Amino acid sequence: MSEFFQYVVVGLANGGVYATLALALVLIHRATGIVNFAQGEMGMFCTFIAWSLITHHGLPYWPAFFLTLLIAFAGGAATYKVVIQPLSRTGELTVVMATIALLIILNGLAGWIWSPEVKFLRSPSPFAPGDHFEVGGVIVNKQDLTVIVISLICVALVFLFFRFTRLGLQMRASAVGPATSRLLGIRVAMMLSIGWGLAAVLSAVSGMLAASQLELDPNFMLIVLTYAFAAAVLGGIDSPIGSVVGAFIIGIGISLLSGYASSFLGTELQLPLALAVLMLVLIVRPAGLFGQVVVRRV
Amino acid sequence: MSPFGANRILWRVLALAAVPLLVVFLPKAFNDYFNYRLAFVGIYFIAIVGLNVLTGYNGQISLGHGAFMAIGAYTTAILNVNYGVGIYWTIPVAGILTGAFGFLFGLPALRLSGVYLALATFSLATSIPLVAKRFEGFTGGGQGKTIALPSSPIGGLSTNEWLSYLTWAIAGLMFGVAWLVLRGQLGRAFRAVRDAPIAAVSSGVSLARYKTLAFGIAAAYAGVAGALLAIAIAFVNPDTFPVSLSILLLTGAVVGGLGSLEGMLFGAVFIQFAPSWAEHLSEHLHYNEATVQSTVFYGLILLAVLFLMPGGAAGLIHQLGNGLKRLRKWRYSRADSRATA
Amino acid sequence: MRRLVVALGVVAIGAAVALPGAMGGSTATPGVTAKIVSIGGTFPFSGPASSYAPIPVGMQAYFSYVNAKKTNGKRGVFGRQIKFNAVDDGYNPALTVQKTKQLVEQDHVFALVGGLGTEPQEAVTAYANQQKVPQIYVSTGATEWGARDKHEEHPWTVGWQPDYQAEAAIYGRYIAKNLPNAKIGIIYQNDSYGRDYINGLEAGLGSHKSQIASQQGFEVTDTSVTNQVIALRRAGVDTLMIFGTPTPTIRTYATMAAVGWKPQNIFLNSVSATDTFMGIAVARAGAAEVNGSISTYYTKDPANPSWANDAGMKLYKSIMAKYAPANAKVTDGLYIYGMAKAYTFVQALKAAGPNPTRAGLMKAVLNMNDKSNPFLLPGVVTKTGKTDFFPISQQQLIRFNNGTWSPMGQLTDTRPRG
């Protein structure tokens, strides 16, 4: 049994990294109605900025962390203004394609500016890498625990922001009914770019957390994006809670699969099997676990 | 009569005839390697014409078209290497098998649309290469399968010329079939399913039938393209079909203009040549790290194209056409008003 | 209206044609003129393997150095400048084939040098041999590049570095001799790379093979190896073999530290044992976790201060300072790997004489006995012969301690006998 819980703990640690990025995807989808495929690369790029602030500009970790979040916010909002808004009158797929172009540009740019060698970004955790405790034979690493906590704090902050602040309310209104909101005097375009800024902040957090578990190179967020995308869709692409739950389900699911199934399935089939299960869930609940089925009118 | 009136059919026939002529003569006009690239344009053309049937005409997004190409390519490689089937005979088999697979995949996908379908197809693109890697005895695993190098069966034609002619002959055929299918009853049903699904159902169009059929057709096209890809590179392995291939194909379809078959010609040219335009651009600007930069330039070119023609090449043409019409109307109306004055 | 679509297509194709431009003419030997020797290779500048991108950069730096240096009053090799066309294939064989054909048929390169990746290079081996273009010094250590039957099938193809199986066999023999009671665990990348290592290890262990207690595979796409590490720990492993490319290797160390496990002996494959990667492993897992790890190398290690006064190392550093991009990390072993390889090629090109042909180059490549490579460890000979197609097959066992590797014992030769 301790084996099972060990796999769950490992899965939770992975899920924490996916959760913030999945939440970012959901924010964008609610605001703009598209999946931002550049979301992971925005996080990757910000993580390189943080690395550069620490390594080349001598900033301590936390100032660099928050400065990066500021830069991320500005970058995300600017991306909306410069790239997404001008294309917003075109087809949905054109905008999606533009995010793919952004993905390609950011990925190439990171390799160009910082050279493609693997880099190291330290963990935000105050604990040493080996710090851990055991509960009933289950090893819990303190750094991993920090990652989960930071991730949950971010999610909670976003949640509180949308629920209890005026700006959050205006942003929700702009996403749900832009025309009505405009009539009510809400600056919808401004709200949407703030939404993009916030999503970029979340992806920067995700990147900096992931870099402490994975390795910092221009490609490290691509795989995280895959899982976050799956998590966001599993939870229901418009449900923030759903995306976070989805992220932990995916983290735990993959961990259990790799623990129990890979010995007879082969490691190759882990991901296909996980995705197949995901598809089955979606066939039963086509709008995800927490999504609402939209009734379409003719 | 204006070219936009009764002569329109004639013009279209002439234009369509120009393509085969180009295909026949272009290979002779450039260096031999260029023909090889033309063959790839043809392969992408076939694949994105199929993708357009699904996404453009039937409104179902696919981020997994590369997976269908993988199935076609593996069909060719396995039939040819394991069972000694003649390489060209594997092409129709690849089309039919992949089509059947696509049809079956379309059944569960029926329940999904939008982002959910995007994830389903994306999962397919992620999974197929891993599945191919797993069943090593059959597929060659991660090391893949090496096929005999292609060679021209016709004297006087170089290998590259032969590949180009072969690909474009098949591309022409498949384009014609798609064109005929889409302008008929089936095409109307596809569009009805895309634009007004509930109205389509209430007038007796079966959503399930047409959505899965669209998946089947799209997959069959990708299967043929995959078979031709396997023949052209004489090798398949899981790395040959990364997720980025599926995204590349969708790029081609969007840049060409969803809902326009002819636009796919531009889309195919774009995805084959834009990366090398990017490389040349970055070489001109900065030699030393040219290769690292070129992906940045490719992304910028793609972004520029999206801004300049958000409806794809076909959309741009459409707009230009409308502009011309308006211009002409304006001139006529001025002439009329002068005449009456 | 639709004709415009077609017209646009035509224009696009026209533009596509005009931009690449035709280059290179056919001379007696393709790629060789009085002034230039043109060579090329495919490398993953983008895509999943882009962390290997320093290799062609190191090669280019050395070629730039040779091109600028005067030998007998002439710059370059016999007065010819080496033009190295390193192109991006993104580690995708479909692109490797296209780009290789472009190098051969459009750019008319003299030889394909250093192309990276086992599967991508396999995808073009048949083609290079059909065209009789040398495909030499590929950047992969799969055993097949030097295997005799493969060589007979593909005489225009040659590897460069010691092969993975031979390397793993060194570990196997070391364990059999020095750690006869070891309980061995393997964490491996589930592909031909990882399996080459397992095969070599088993061969080296001989009768001790049965002491392999647990084998745990992972996919390159996995984001975590925690379950594998925990399984190895549970199996009571005291001697761990890490057979993976750099990123999963670093992750393995980090995970071992995270679960508080330090097996007595750790062996890791040489590809992942460069300074950059070890530095990150130390940062991620702590020095205590990484100290004592055993690997092999055959190039000098630019991160190790003991080479500071070595002439070869000084040369390497001066070349990097002058010809490599400013953001290149000089201590990264991949640059010196590329430079050592470029050195071998220049030696072969010199040996091919003032009027090189492709066949002449192959003859030089296959009859080499070069002790002069300043970037390889002293004593490592680049040697090929009638039955020996592994240019480098000597390696040095090394142990990691406090940030640097130090040698253990003598150079080991894994050159096939006979």
Image (cartoon, coloured by chain):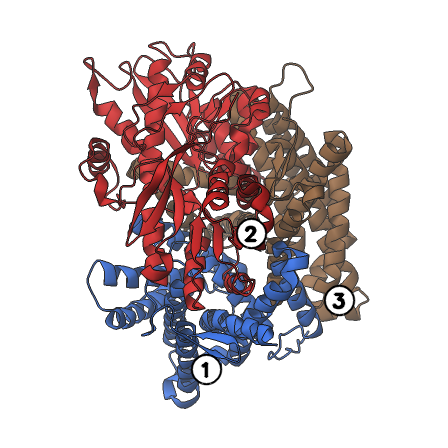
**The image quarter in which residue C192 lies:** top right
Residue B27 image offset from top left, x and y in percent: 56, 24
Q: Is residue C357 above or below residue C371?
A: above
Secondary structure beneath dot 3 equals: helix
- Residue C45, can we see it? yes
Instruction: Name the residue type under label 3.
Output: Ala
- Whether residue C258 sits left or right of residue B114 in the image: it is left
Give residue C252's quadrant in the image: bottom left
Instruction: Give the mark toward the camera: 1 or 3.
Output: 1
The local crowd at label 3, few if under 14, some if 14 to 19, many if 20 or more residues have their Cα within 10 Å, is some
- Per the image, the residue denoted by label 2 is B243
Dots 1 and 3 on the same chain: no
Disc on the earlier residue, 3 or 2: 3
Q: Position of residue B319 (x, y in %)?
A: 51, 52
- The residue to which callout 3 is attached is B200
- Give the letter of the chain under mark 1: A
Q: Which chain is blue?
A: A
In the figure, the red chain has which letter? C
Residue linked to disc 1: A172
Dot 3 falls on which chain?
B
- Label 3 and label 2: CA atoms lie apart by 34 Å
Q: Residue at x 32, y 39 (%)?
A: C335
* CB-based contact (under 8 Å), mark 2 and mark 1: no
Q: Residue furthest bottom?
A: A164
Up-down relation of residue C250 to residue C272 (above or below): below
Seen at 63% across and 74% down, the residue is A287
Front in this rendered view, residue B323 or A286: A286
Residue A145 position, x and y percent, is: 42, 76
Same chain for the residues at labels 2 and 1, yes or no? no
